[in-house]
Image (cartoon, rainbow, N blue to C red):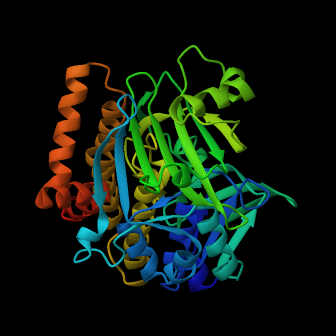
Amino acid sequence: MTQKDKQRVLIVGAGPVGMVCALALNRQGIPVTVFEQEPGPVKDQRAASIHPTTLAMLDELDVTRAIVPRGLVSETYQYRDRVSGKLIAEFDLRRLADVFKFPFVLQYEQYKLTHDIAEQYANESDFDVRYGHAVTHIEQHADHVEIAASGPDGIRRYRGAYLIGADGGRSTVRKAADIAFEGFTYQERFIKIATTFDFQRAHPDYAYRNYFSDPDEWCNLFKVRGEDGEGLWRAIFPTRVDETEEEALSEAGVEARLQKFFPKAGRYEVAYCNVYGVNQRVAQTFRRGRVLLAGDAAHVNNPIGGMGMNGGIHDAVNLAGKLGAVLTRGADDALLDLYSRQRRHAAVAFVQAQTIANKKMLEEKDERSRQEKFEELARTADDPAGARQYMRRASLLESLETANAIT
């Protein structure tokens, strides 16, 4: 085994977090092997908002020049009251042009980002991505980790210096390392509906990112660019607690939801829809020996605010930097405990806290409390200093600064 192979890092999960981590390690000369149980890149319609802080990290990896022209640049986002139809507040990221190199959110689905990295950089000997490989066994040793993976050629064993679990909320790696996943599951599920209907033509004052508050059924409405290059709007709603998946996904159920919020003549043309459960959970630790966790394997949250994928990519970049120092510059591996402390703090104090608060604001049922929250948000948006602070937190800049200050 060569010295380079002794430095090899094994990554489970070829989503955006696993692939960004692999690229960041590979850029430091560290060989990586990525294992993905799916037979190829998954075209899942999940996270689609890339925040300014994350764009800056991707720019360091030479990724933004390819993705920005293909995404939708969203400089503003809005909060609205569905009951009254009024705009509550609008935030403009251009106010932070002195802080962010990219003062906007890029609407670009995670599967496209994953595909871009794989297509441009992966499948060399030192950046090896293996689709159709499900990890079935994990062993830790004093100086390496060893896994077994079931692939097209049967079960094979692989060895690496460290193992990173970026394999989602049901992480095989986290479970094998016996790391508790602390938190709760929401009673209701979320339904995502995509339609080709042009909401901005019907509502020219809408932004690309809109949050609608309603005491019975809130909605998030975002625009992305479809496979054909045309606009596609994605609406996310909560389901009723007693609503079955079949009822939610029925043609009548989908149409009723869209018409309730956005009434129009004629039916909506629906591109796709799906229902999924939502958790707020954080791993007890992000490190156990030579096993490390990142992204949804380490923390999951509701999608309001678009913080899950972004926080996961922040994990990936932080971890890659520290692993690079350990593997190539002789740093003590206690540095990896610092990774766990920093990124777990970011997950608990910022991502979890902010996403829970976002949901509570959108679904507030007490009318007096609703109006008080609306007034507070409007004052914040109208105050230049208050708006800057709000956007710093919403863009995860504050979480990065606070977490990175932990020693």
Instruction: Mark yes or no: residue 126 visible.
Output: no
* Residue shown at the point (48%, 81%) measured from the top left: 61
Q: Is residue 302 left or right of residue 1?
A: left
The answer to which of 292 and 109 lies nearer the viewer is 109
x%, y% of residue 328?
43, 83
Question: Is 331 drawn above or below residue 406 in the view shown?
Answer: below
In this rendering, the count of numbered labels is 0
Q: Is residue 376 left or right of residue 18?
A: left
- Screen quadrant of the N terminus: bottom right
The x, y position of residue 99, in whole percent, is 23, 74
- Give the x, y percent position of residue 79: 34, 44
Q: Seen in the image, is 79 located left or right of residue 191?
A: left
* Residue pictured at 20% horizontal, 45% vertical: 378
Asked if residue 362 can be seen in this view, the reply is yes
Q: Residue at x 38, y 28 (%)?
A: 83
Furthest toward the top, the residue is: 242
- Image point (37%, 72%), residue name: 322
The location of residue 321, given as percent across then percent down, is: 39, 74
Q: Nearer the viewer, residue 116 or 152?
A: 116
The C terminus appears in which quarter of the rendering?
bottom left
Residue 268 left/right relative to 96:
right
Asked which quadrant contains residue 118, the reply is: bottom right
For the view shown, which residue lies furthest in the right direction?
A: 153
Question: From this viewpoint, which residue is outermost toward the front?
Answer: 265
Camera-side residue: 308 or 395? 395
